[in-house]
Image (tube, coloured by chain):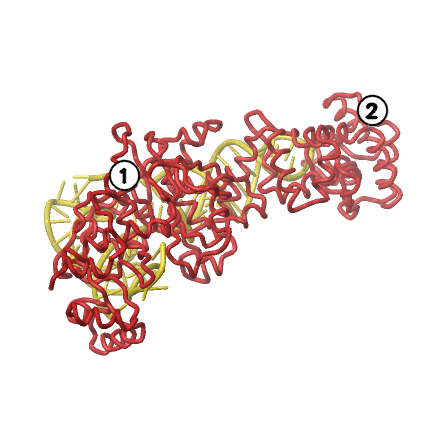
Chain colours: A red, B yellow
Amino acid sequence: MDYQALAAYLFPHITTTPEEIEARYPARTLKEGAKVTRMAPSPTGFMHLGNLYGALVDERLAHQSDGVFYLRIEDTDQKREVPGGVQTILEVFKRFGLPFDEGATLEGDNGQYGPYRQRQRAAIYQTFAKELVARGLAYPDFTTEEELAEMHKLQEERKENFGYYGAYAVGRNLTFEEIQAKIEAGQPYVIRFRSPGDPAKKVYHTDLVKGKMELPENDQDVVLLKSDGIPTYHFAHVVDDHLMGTTHVVRGEEWLATLPIHLQLFDTMGWKRPKYIHTAQLMKMDGGSKRKLSKRKDPELALDYYFEAGVPVPAVLEYLMILLNSNFEEWRLANPMADRNSFPFNTKKMSSSGALFDIDKLHDVSRNVISRMSADEVYDYIVTWAKDFDPELFAALEADPAYAKAILSIGRGGKKPRKDIGTWKDVRGYIGFFYDDFFTPDYSKMPDKDPAQIRAILEDYAAQYDDTEDASAWFERIKAMCPKYGYTANMKEYKQDPTAFAGNVADLSTILRVAVTGRENSPELEVVMKLLGKDRVIKRLIEASKLV
RNA sequence: GGCCCCAUGGUCAAGCGGUUAAGACGACGGCCUCUCACGCCGUAAUCAUGAGUUCGAUUCUCAUUGGGGUCACCA
């Protein structure tokens, strides 16, 4: 068969040559060892934790080596595309602070290696497909979906490998005349690769996380161009990552199965293979067994979930870093305030087995991340969150930022900061009593003492509270009240013989605490009272004395 | 079913031929303490199984088992 003629017949509109295209994508001039990575999502309008997990690797690898991290939109499947999908991707990356150096933007392209939307690159793929046809390495195939399904059934019965290969690759044997006739009859067709592979032979690959492996050669005549002339992932991946100069391809391990196809394609095209990093899947415990996190079943996989739950962005990132490089945790302990990006990220430390997503651990990481923030930072985060998810809290905070920040400053800073806040959702419960609107006292939390005595203590203290006293004077006053009620101020003494006293200083403090904060626990009462202000403290004490 | 990947406590994991098998989360107990949070101390809990290599295997090899992935004109 005259392959040149076939190529010309199939692609009459393609007049550029592969060489001309190659010339448009010169080698990048980067310093030695610089890595070029890419994030290549489909614009399905949905970004999940797994996307971020891989993207973090891409971003670190590139920016740690003074390389390039770019965004390429894989919009080859029109059916799955969602309007605004690209915008969602851009917004998520902006929010998570993972900046692209080049690639698709809302306005168009930023960079010299575009276009960065695959649909706009149709002519490029077709040029290379045309060349493959001319070399006899690709051919048109008219097999219908039904015929393919039948073939699959037959293969199942015969217990043979599924797919379009070898003797099953009927399109291989079509003559030029047959092809012409079918096309003229308007039959749709795809362009398939004529695989030179033999599954009995091995292809060798060294993965940056999985290590050395040998896989059977690919013998499937995979589809290169779909019937609409748009490439499949396999072909687009090879062409784009070659032209765009990607040095490291980071993707989920579900791609391992099709790696032989990609390697074969790179080899056939005479192009250098990129390095691959096949990351382990994020898993989840479901019933008794692990399973891959699914975006349909697991709401916590959607990034929106974290925004709503009020997990701060840096906490999500730190948690992901821990999963990615287990020594990150150790590093963080040694460098509590260091910029996350100064951590020496290393693919060698990446685990080759899938990690279970652990929400408890995430919350712990979040608690620690928040505890390291300044009150101002925390305030800004909460306000941003509350604006969308808790309008009442938002209004209260905005009404008096200085007051809110003073509240949030309690126990903040220093070597042992408080860690009350795990997510922004916790905030209302934690600081609510500082606001009259949210103050819902539960006097049933009062110690189990005679109500008359509780009332007496409340009134007694209300009459003498002095907001000018410092912390120690404040506590001395409370201790001094003890004997009057048969309480002891000495906890050790009390523990030795509880029956000797009507109560202790902790009981007395709790009575005051429940009255003032409405709960049995709170940060240091003395500080709380000062922030609340004398009037409000006394008002609450009296109010409680009436209701107990 | 074929092919591929993976395998240390409940979870994340260190380990890379000889260790009392780290650490973190979680659980439990205690200390500190006016409560809580923090912090500190401690307890329980792991090398899936079977062969082989070796003086010696958690570590290397091979099976088995288990888990996961993949076999589209989806990525």
Q: CA distance from mark 1 to mark 2?
A: 77 Å
SS assignment at label 2: loop
Residue A500: tell me if it is visible: no
Q: In the rendered structure, which amino acid carries the disc numbered 1?
A: Tyr
Look at the picture and state if A336 lies above or below A254.
above
Q: In the rendered structure, which amino acid carries the disc numbered 2?
A: Asp
Look at the picture and state if A156 lies above or below A60.
below
The answer to which quarter of the image holds residue A532 is: top right
Q: Nearer the viewer, residue A218 or B25?
A: A218
The residue at 85%/30% (across/down) is A535
The residue at 45%/48% (across/down) is A49
In the picture of the structure, the residue carrying the numbered disc 2 is A466
In the picture of the structure, the residue carrying the numbered disc 1 is A25
Near mark 1 (Cα within 10 A), the count class, few <14, some 14-19 or many ≥20, is some
Residue A293: tell me if it is visible: yes
Q: Nearer the viewer, residue A423 or A237?
A: A237
Q: Is residue A338 left or right of residue A344?
A: right
| Of callouts 1 and 2, the N-terminal one | 1
The residue at 34%/61% (across/down) is A228
Residue B62 point in image, percent of width and height: 16, 57
SS assignment at label 1: loop
The answer to which quarter of the image holds residue A137 is: bottom left
Residue A383 point in image, percent of width and height: 65, 37
Q: Is residue A94 left or right of residue A136?
A: right
Q: Nearer the viewer, residue A229 or A306?
A: A229
Residue A139 point in image, percent of width and height: 20, 62
